[in-house]
Image (cartoon, grey):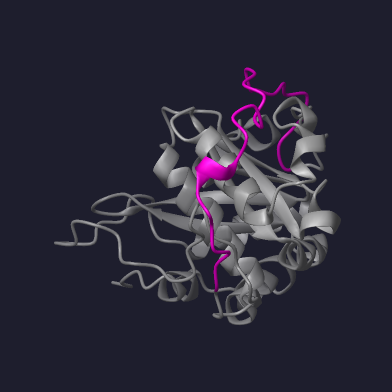
Amino acid sequence: MQNLRRIISHFSKKTLVQQYPFGHHSHPPIFPFFLSLSRLHFGVNSNLSTLGGRGLDSVPRNFIKWVALGFSRGSKFATGFTPFQRKPLDSIIDIEKAKFQSPEDLIAVWDDYHLGRGHIGTAIKAQLYNALDQRSISCRHFVIPLWRGSGYTNMFIQVQMPNILFTGLEDYKAKGTQASPYFTVTHYTELAESKGIVLIRGDVVLPSKLSDSEARWLLETAQTFYLNDVKYRLVERFNKETHEFEFNDVLRALEIPVL
């Protein structure tokens, strides 16, 4: 915990003011390596490819169990939390029927189910999940600037697989372990061996703080920082070499102007 406080303290001395104005920029730059809701990463660096989907008409109508989704919280943020009591995967989809579906159809149905429900549904290739899992063991935390029209807000993340939590850096600095996550992410690994995919579900805990589209962008961006070798070096500096960490390097990596 002392090391985490030192990291945050060091970072706060180097970071720019929250909601830093960017002059006449009216929208965020286009960032690389985005995860489409119906696509998978097939390369750890910049090599991306997709699973070609066949559409939903080949998927049984009763494949998804249309049950109310949600989770209960019994954890503290950032101090080695107890994982959320997530919804079991078999309460969302029929695992037996899933055995006869292709990865493409599984992803399509998973994404379709979460659309418009206040949740985010996506997937990642199993080997990339394993890489993310391994890299997060020694690098639990990072800070990502979230673009908001004329500036950005710094978001603090904690990666403790199969969960990822996001909250505002200013909230974490002010409230510490009492800071509420804005956005939580759960990875479902049950189909990793049989289908080669890991399903991902995101929940926006505080809609007043974070929109669905912002949450999706944060998830995609966090993945790129942990899975891209060059960007992961910044994550390592933040966690292991605090004195060498420069926040401007993060801005440059995201193609955000450094003024």
Would residue 254 appear left or right of 79 to someone viewing this image?
left
Comparing 8 with 51, the one in front is: 51
* Residue occupying image coordinates x 43% and y 30%: 116
Q: Is residue 52 magenta?
A: yes
* Residue occupying image coordinates x 75% and y 42%: 98
**Which quadrant holds residue 193?**
bottom right
Q: Is residue 6 magenta?
A: no
Q: Residue furthest left?
A: 24
**At which x and y percent is residue 62?**
64, 27
Whether residue 88 is visible to the viewer of this picture, yes or no, is no
* Residue occupying image coordinates x 80% and y 64%: 130
* Residue occupying image coordinates x 82% and y 61%: 137
Per the picture, the main secondary structure of the magenta-coloured stretch is loop
**Which quadrant holds residue 229?**
bottom right
Comparing 43 with 259, the one in front is: 43
Would residue 21 appear left or right of 202 to someone viewing this image?
left
Quarter of the image where the C terminus is located: bottom left
**At which x and y percent is residue 115?**
47, 35
Q: Residue furthest front?
A: 58
Span of residues in magenta: 49-78
**Which quadrant holds residue 142?**
bottom right
Q: Could you tell me how many numbered marks the image carries?
A: 0
- In the depicted structure, whether residue 44 falls above or below residue 14: below
Q: Residue furthest top?
A: 68
Comparing 5 with 128, the one in front is: 128
Would residue 214 appear left or right of 240 to someone viewing this image?
left
**At which x and y percent is residue 147?**
35, 54
**At which x and y percent is residue 145?**
44, 57
Comparing 126 with 217, the one in front is: 126
Would residue 188 appear left or right of 251 to someone viewing this image?
right
Whether residue 14 is visible to the viewer of this picture, yes or no, is yes
